[in-house]
Amino acid sequence: MATDELSGSSLDKGRQLVDQLNPGMEAVLEQRYGDIVPGIGESIVDFAYGQQYARPGLDLKSRYLATIAALTALGGHTAPQLKVNIEGGLKVGLTQQEIGEVIWQMALYGGFPAAINALNSALEVFDRHDSEAS
């Protein structure tokens, strides 16, 4: 989905993207964290997807490459979010090689352990993605 095809408020745009890239995410976030942070799912969908990913200026592939790079450089504690974003990157057309290369590039900035941990996360996602495609 091209972001120029999205319409409505930032929340509407965010929900349109989430429906394509991570269906059910808003409800999962609300169910898990809503008792202690009411409205968290809607807030993340609005800000992260509606106000950031839906912005003009970069296509979704570029945004996912940047996100994967940042999460890799931050280190292994970001593995859950990294996996979600690798899945999203695959859905918007990134190849496994492109994802692997951007992760490996981060060895220069986040260090070898961070890059290797991210590659291990990527392999988990690729294995699941490949088995679902078969």
Image (tube, rainbow, N blue to C red):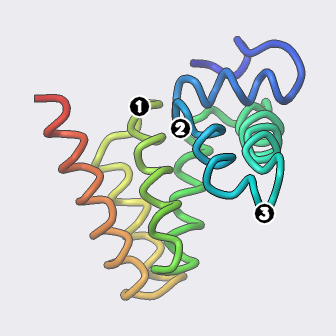
Q: In which quarter of the image is residue 43?
A: top right
Looking at the image, the residue that sits furthest to the front is 35
For label 3, the residue is 36
- Residue found at x 73% / y 39%: 45
Picture disc at residue 61: 2
The disc, 2 or 3, on the residue closer to the chain's N-terminal end is 3
- Tell me where residue 8 appears, x and y as whole percent: 86, 15
Disc 2/disc 3 C-alpha distance (Å)? 33 Å
- Tell me where residue 22 appears, x and y as whole percent: 52, 35
Q: Is mark 2 on a helix, strand or loop?
A: helix
| Above or below, comparing residue 124 to residue 134 in the picture | below
Q: What residue type is labelled 3?
A: Ile
For label 1, the residue is 93
Q: Which of marks 2 and 3 is in front?
A: 3
Q: How many labels does the image show?
A: 3
- Residue found at x 55% / y 33%: 24
- Tell me where residue 107 appears, x and y as whole percent: 43, 80
- Residue found at x 78% / y 33%: 50
Describe residue 35's horizontal placement relative to residue 17 as left or right.
Answer: right
Describe residue 101's horizontal placement relative to residue 4 as left or right.
Answer: left
Q: In which quarter of the image is residue 103?
A: bottom left
- Residue found at x 46% / y 42%: 89
Q: How crowded is mark 1: few (under 14 residues within 10 Å), some or many (20 or more)?
A: few
The disc, 1 or 3, on the residue closer to the chain's N-terminal end is 3
The disc, 2 or 1, on the residue closer to the chain's N-terminal end is 2
As rendered, which of 106 and 32 lies closer to the eye?
A: 32
Disc 2/disc 1 C-alpha distance (Å)? 7 Å
- Tell me where residue 17 appears, x and y as whole percent: 63, 27
Describe residue 124's horizontal placement relative to residue 105 as left or right.
Answer: left
Disc 1/disc 3 C-alpha distance (Å)? 36 Å
